Image (tube, rainbow, N blue to C red):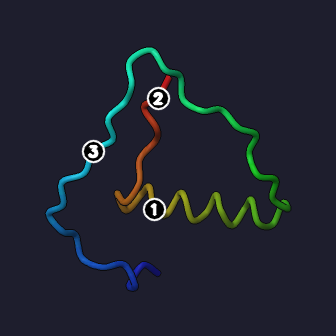
Amino acid sequence: DLSGIPPAREVEFQIDLVPGVAPVARVHYQLALAEMMKLADQLQELSEKGFIRPSSLP
């Protein structure tokens, strides 16, 4: 249930990237299988509702 999320607002936001600099790569935080499954379900729901989208980074 996403009823606690505030309504969409007109906000200007951007992240300025530095040319030639690679994103920081880190080891993922380890989760128990049940936590990983819950996270996957939440991500799927948020993706289906258009709140998030897959990364476009290489």
Q: Nearer the viewer, mark 1 or mark 3?
A: 3
Q: Residue 56, percent across and down?
A: 42, 31
Name the quadrant containing residue 9: bottom left
Element marked by disc 2: loop
Name the quadrant containing residue 8: bottom left
> Is label 2 in contact with label 3 (beta carbons under 8 Å)?
no
Q: Is residue 37 above or below residue 28?
A: below
Residue at the limit of the structure toward the left, as seen here: 10
Q: Residue 40, percent across and down?
A: 64, 57
Residue drawn 34% across the image and 57% down it: 50
Label 1 vs 3, first from the N-terminus: 3
The residue at which mark 2 appears reads as: 57
Disc 2 marks a residue whose amino acid type is: Leu
Element marked by disc 1: helix
Which disc, if any, is residue 14?
A: 3
Disc 1 marks a residue whose amino acid type is: Leu
Element marked by disc 3: loop
Residue at the limit of the structure toward the top, as seen here: 20
Marks 1/3: CA distance? 21 Å
Q: Residues within 10 Å of mark 2 (few under 14, many from 20)?
A: few
Which disc, if any, is residue 54?
A: none
Residue drawn 27% across the image and 44% down it: 14
